[in-house]
Image (cartoon, helix red, strand yellow):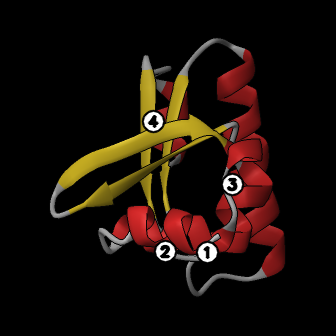
Amino acid sequence: MADCSITTPGFLLLDEPTRGIDVGSKAQIYRLMNELAGQGKAVVFVSSYLPELLGVCDRIGVMCRGEFSCVRPVAEWSEQEIILTAVGQAELGEAAA
């Protein structure tokens, strides 16, 4: 990742970057993400740990069957809504609410 930040890309794609690492390293990754976002760079952060996504991201896009089914501000999501959307059950969850 250090090489990516040196070359100043227009965007940074991070796939599960905090999985299996210590808390200090996670904090460094979060700082890098915030720094790049502050410079106007796009940061795509892929994670299966929903509390992390809800705590770190501005917007969340959920994939279902290999396609983005919904992208919206993080404040509009709950963990349950993310899961239901990912498995194609979002309409059922809304009907039950």
Q: Are marks 3 and 4 in contact (CB under 8 Å)?
A: no
Q: Of callouts 1 and 4, which one flags the residue occurring earlier in the amino acid sequence?
A: 4
Q: Of callouts 3 and 4, which one flags the residue occurring earlier in the amino acid sequence?
A: 4
> Residue 31 vs residue 76: left or right?
right
Residue 71, compared with residue 97, is above or below; it is: above
Question: Element under label 1?
Answer: helix
Residue 28, compared with residue 41, is above or below; it is: below
Q: Are marks 1 and 4 in contact (CB under 8 Å)?
A: no
The nearer-to-camera label among 1 and 3 is 1
* Image quadrant occupied by the C terminus: bottom right
Q: Which residue is mark 2?
A: 83
Q: Of callouts 2 and 4, which one flags the residue occurring earlier in the amino acid sequence?
A: 4
Q: Could you give the CA–CA distance between mark 2 and mark 3, rounded to whole angstroms?
A: 25 Å
Q: Which residue is mark 4?
A: 12
Q: Could you give the CA–CA distance between mark 1 and mark 3, rounded to whole angstroms?
A: 26 Å
Q: Which residue is mark 3?
A: 29
